[in-house]
Image (cartoon, rainbow, N blue to C red):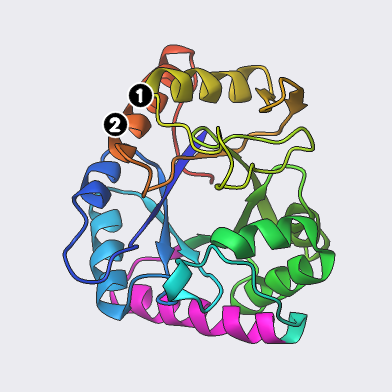
């Protein structure tokens, strides 16, 4: 089982959370400079991941730093393709200089959620990834349009679940604006992770048991106490007999 986190989402002072997370996670999603980060931050984060043997991935977003990429924006598939291509190429150039290969791509925030339900946007994401490197893995919400689009493009996929986020009955993530959308209780987060992996279910906010496929589990880097949550998740999974490693 892969354990991932969103990192490189700072601009000035280096993130102590990133350094702690790298000791626990097996793959890292690195901001590509639009919702957060910049070329210098990308380089520091790539080096940090490489030094810990953590697989690195691009974490592209809408061009919306003001709202941290979490505001839905309406762009055409062609516009999205160009926006993603620029971000993927930016991180690839940084990683190439440091001789660290790119492993995967995971859209960020509102883009992630929109591509999960909109086929045309999902196809644009898959096309941008395939153009850059058809060997990359696409991370997307389990059961989403993004996973389906990547499969149509003959890309490898990783169905993602979230230990620290609330779910709705349809399998989508609960909007951050409603109660229960964010979970920071370490015991609850760890128990949910084990359930999603071992039983392939997660309990939605209304009590519905939602079926999921878990290839990779995310702990958000900006969740309070993210490194502690990630350690608890990893410990709980390993205690349940699950080995943590990046997707081959």
Q: Residue drawn at (82%, 71%), measured in percent from left and top?
A: 120
Q: Identify the disc placed on residue 232.
A: 1
Q: Residues within 10 Å of mark 2 (few under 14, many from 20)?
A: some
Q: Quadrant of residue 205?
A: top right
| Pick the front one: 62 or 139 | 62
- Measuring from the top left, give residue 190's x and y in whole percent: 45, 22
Q: Find disc 2 in the rendering and name its residue.
A: 228
Q: Which residues are magenta?
A: 79-102
Q: Residue drawn at (23%, 54%), measured in percent from left and top?
A: 51
How much space separates mark 2 and mark 1, taking CA atoms? 6 Å
- Labels 2 and 1 touching (C-beta < 8 A): yes
Q: Relative to residue 121, is residue 11 drawn left or right?
A: left
Q: Is residue 101 visible?
A: yes
Position of residue 81 relative to residue 72, above or below, is below
Q: Residue drawn at (28%, 46%), measured in percent from left and top?
A: 22
- Measuring from the top left, give residue 207's x and y in whole percent: 71, 20
Q: Relative to residue 42, is residue 75 drawn left or right?
A: right
Q: Is residue 106 visible?
A: no
Q: Is residue 111 magenta?
A: no
> Regarding mark 1 in the picture, which secondary structure is present there?
helix
Q: Is residue 92 magenta?
A: yes
């Amino acid at each position: 089982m892969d354990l991932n986190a969103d990192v490189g989402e700072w601009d000035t002072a280096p993130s102590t959370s990133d350094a702690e997370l790298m000791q626990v996670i097996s793959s890292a999603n690195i901001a590509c400079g639009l919702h957060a980060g910049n070329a210098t931050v990308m380089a520091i984060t790539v080096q940090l991941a490489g030094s810990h043997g953590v697989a690195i991935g691009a974490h592209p977003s809408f061009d919306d730093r003001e709202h941290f990429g979490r505001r839905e924006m309406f762009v055409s598939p062609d516009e999205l393709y160009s926006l993603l291509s620029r971000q993927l190429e930016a991180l690839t150039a940084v990683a190439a200089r440091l001789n660290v290969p790119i492993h995967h791509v995971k859209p960020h925030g509102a883009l992630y959620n929109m591509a999960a339900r909109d086929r045309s946007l999902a196809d644009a994401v898959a096309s941008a990834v395939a153009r850059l490197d058809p060997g990359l893995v696409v991370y997307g919400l389990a059961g989403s349009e993004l996973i389906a689009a990547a499969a149509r493009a003959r890309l490898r996929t990783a169905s993602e679940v979230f230990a620290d986020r609330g779910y709705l009955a349809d399998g989508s993530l609960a909007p951050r604006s409603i109660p229960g959308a964010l979970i920071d209780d370490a015991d609850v987060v760890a128990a949910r992770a084990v359930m999603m992996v071992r039983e392939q279910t997660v309990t939605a906010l209304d009590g519905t048991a939602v079926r999921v496929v878990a290839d990779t589990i995310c702990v958000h880097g900006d969740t309070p106490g993210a490194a502690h949550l990630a350690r608890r998740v990893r410990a709980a999974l390993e205690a349940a007999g699950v080995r943590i490693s990046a997707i081959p």
